[in-house]
Amino acid sequence: MISILILGSGSATPKVNRNPAGVLVNSNNSYFLVDCGEGTQLQLRRYKQSLQRIHQIFISHLHADHFLGLFGLLSTQSLLGREKALDVFAPKGLQEIIEVQMKITKTYWGFPLNFHDIDCKKEAVLWQDEEMEVHSIPLNHKIDCVGFSFRQKTKPRNILQSKIEFYKIPVFARRAIKNGADFTDENGRVIPNKELTTAAPRVFSFTYISDTRVLKEVPVAVLGTDLLYHEATFLSDMIERAKATHHCTAQQAAQFAALAEVKKLVLGHFSARYDELDEFIAEAKPYFANVDVAQDGQWFSTE
Amino acid sequence: MISILILGSGSATPKVNRNPAGVLVNSNNSYFLVDCGEGTQLQLRRYKQSLQRIHQIFISHLHADHFLGLFGLLSTQSLLGREKALDVFAPKGLQEIIEVQMKITKTYWGFPLNFHDIDCKKEAVLWQDEEMEVHSIPLNHKIDCVGFSFRQKTKPRNILQSKIEFYKIPVFARRAIKNGADFTDENGRVIPNKELTTAAPRVFSFTYISDTRVLKEVPVAVLGTDLLYHEATFLSDMIERAKATHHCTAQQAAQFAALAEVKKLVLGHFSARYDELDEFIAEAKPYFANVDVAQDGQWFSTE
């Protein structure tokens, strides 16, 4: 399972109940932060999430509502005694912004901070470990901007301990069996894989599509994603404004979700002009039924 | 009267109910912002204060919890259509921080923004208009840091319209009378000022003492201030920590208030380690009786 916590469902002009952009991603107790608008550190505290469990931060683009909270978050992490390294993935320029503030304010973090410039023109694996890989998804915004696709890695099948003992399966043969091979014992008898193993745990994916005009084609890393967070800054009556500002309407986000064959869609990044969000659901549902709207503090999970 | 709205009563590590530093000052419907920690723009909205009525912003020092909210505030002011010029008074360096972010994010404000570097070593009038002057107060913090004293200007006495007509007081003579002079009519008769005028409206002052070790001497511009906001990051049992971090205890702030002969004291900038603030009152009261503690969203006024 992958779960996401909405830290900010607002857009450039924040509202009291809608912080600027931020999503906390939880995959098997690994925590990732995606975007970090002003106030993100306080939102994490408000929703009782540890700041120190976050080791990778992904920033979609350098508009203020997506990164202004980073310096404060880093400051607090340092003040609270963080020593573990932190990686920040962002379009080129954020490192300079942070380092100028460090220089002028004479701030030094108590932990190693590594910046990684994202090439916003191409889809790439930005980061991975044994369990997860994170892809960048080029978007179409006014400035360089990417989305992120979090994909849990397929795991090997589990060999049953009882079968290892019964068939005396040697260590060197086990990796192939975990990957689906049958086993041939010393007498030449072939034991089918399905008798030896149980299925690998299911893997899930989450995609975050930040500020963008609607994508006409579905990037490979997005196809079939279990949970899609997609910006829907406007309703369709504002489609001209959406085009002009390189944003999407609820209908466009839903149409993209259908095209991408995702399992579940969460809309967010709402313009401050909207108080109620029922219209976003109503507009999206005819195009993609399994849709919800993000609200600050709400969790969503893959199903 | 001068009123202040507490936007943030916390210190470097914010809490959910204590934003980083920020105070809105209201003097006869002129609004000034003092410090602008992360989330200040949202605090202004939360407490239903217009962002656009603020034309002067005073930043005490370049620690993150005192200025990180500025870029977001300026962005929103611009997005909401601000055209009126804005003046920012801050120690040298803030302009560079803001301009680097503007350059990298390709942000342009729709209004003129003027930075004024504060010389933190001397007391000076930073800004004034017909009704108010704002003084810088050098403080003793780890980096260059100033407080601010807002002093309403003494106004002339009011000449009674009935007396102008009765004594046929010519226009050229009125300014002197407003400033307290008697009037000699064309027959050489002296009319005493108090028969011609009513008293000028009372004027008030507010002083903001940001992060500092306790001041040993009272700056001229602080003496007798009607309302004093003074940092009290710690209680006295943490006095060594207060010294090491160049902060004050509640007792020190109260002793300073007594020395400065202020009318009313409000303590703020509390360390995140404290949940309840009753102890701050209890510790301060023996040294200065008219004391209160700042809480986000609370208004205080000169009396």
Image (cartoon, coloured by chain):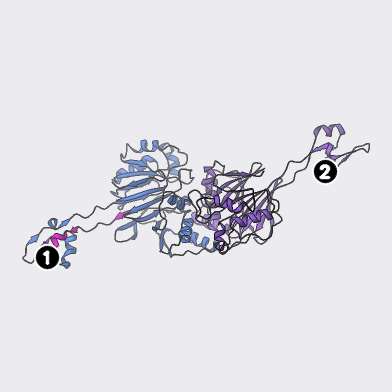
Chain colours: A blue, B purple
- The kind of secondary structure element at disc 2 is loop
Q: Is residue A55 magenta-colored?
A: no
Residue found at the very far right of the displayed protein: B187
Quick check: can you spot residue B85? no
Residue at image mark 1 = A168
Front-most of residues A119 and B176: B176
Magenta stretch bounds: A144-167
10 Å crowding of disc 2: few (<14), some (14-19), many (20+): some
**Residue A86 location, x and y as percent?**
41, 61
Front-most of residues B282 and B196: B282
Classify A167 as above or below B170: below
Task: Identify residue type, mark 2.
Answer: Gly
**Residue B186 location, x and y as percent?**
92, 37
Front-most of residues A143 and B128: B128
Q: Chain of mark 1?
A: A
Which numbered circle lies on residue A91? none
Residue at image mark 2 = B180
Q: Are marks 2 and 1 in contact (CB under 8 Å)?
A: no
Task: Identify residue type, mark 1.
Answer: Lys
In the displayed structure, does residue A21 sit left or right of residue B282? left
